[in-house]
Image: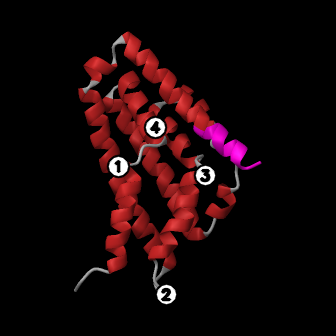
Amino acid sequence: MSLDPRLYAFIGVAAILTILPGADMALVTRNVLVVGRRRTMLTIGGIGVGCIIHATASALGLSAILATSPANAGSARAAAFGPFLQGFLTNVLNPKVAIFYLTFLPQFIGPGEPVFRRSLFLASLHITMGFAWLTAYAWFVDQLGAVLTRPRVKAWLERVTGGLLIALGERLAWARR
């Protein structure tokens, strides 16, 4: 029994999209340096739960509603919360993730396939890849911690990652007007 070629295509494209830098990687970088790798695993867990919510909403057809929301500015405010909640809010309030699941997953569901089950299966593959990638990335950043936690470097990284998160939120807010 051979696997569906669409599944191989999905895995390849999802892997590329998973490793591209974005808000999740910026938050993981920040949290490894600020709260440590162990607590950053909570951030990665929150990101995963956010993806599960998006995947379920997409499978149920709700992502269209979320995609019209100018909500990503909440990710900058998430810095005041614990690592899990930071990861969760950064992901679940990101309309780009909703759009990803709404537009990307259906391309890999064949006619007659159970849409809900197939969507959640594909999303679980993506979430697993994301968890593995962000865990490896957090380990890598942690290994560079001696250099990256120097006060001058740390302050610079805080400004850059904070600025990126705010810029992403503002860009989405202005793009909707």
Q: Residue at x 40, y 17 (%)?
A: 154
Which amino acid, by three-letter code, is at mark 2? Pro
Residue toward you, 116 or 138: 138
Give the vertical position of 55 relative to 152 (above or below): below
Which label is found at residue 131? Answer: 1
Nearer mark to the viewer, of 1 and 3: 3
Residue toward you, 173 or 86: 173
Give the vertical position of 71 relative to 37 (above or below): below
- Which residue has dot 2 on it? 111
Q: Secondary structure at mark 2?
A: loop
Quarter occupied by residue 89: top right
Task: Give the Cα distance between marks 4 and 2.
Answer: 38 Å
Q: Residue at x 49, y 87 (%)?
A: 111
State the predominant SS element of the stretch in magenta. Answer: helix
Range drawn in magenta? 168-177
Q: Secondary structure at mark 1?
A: helix
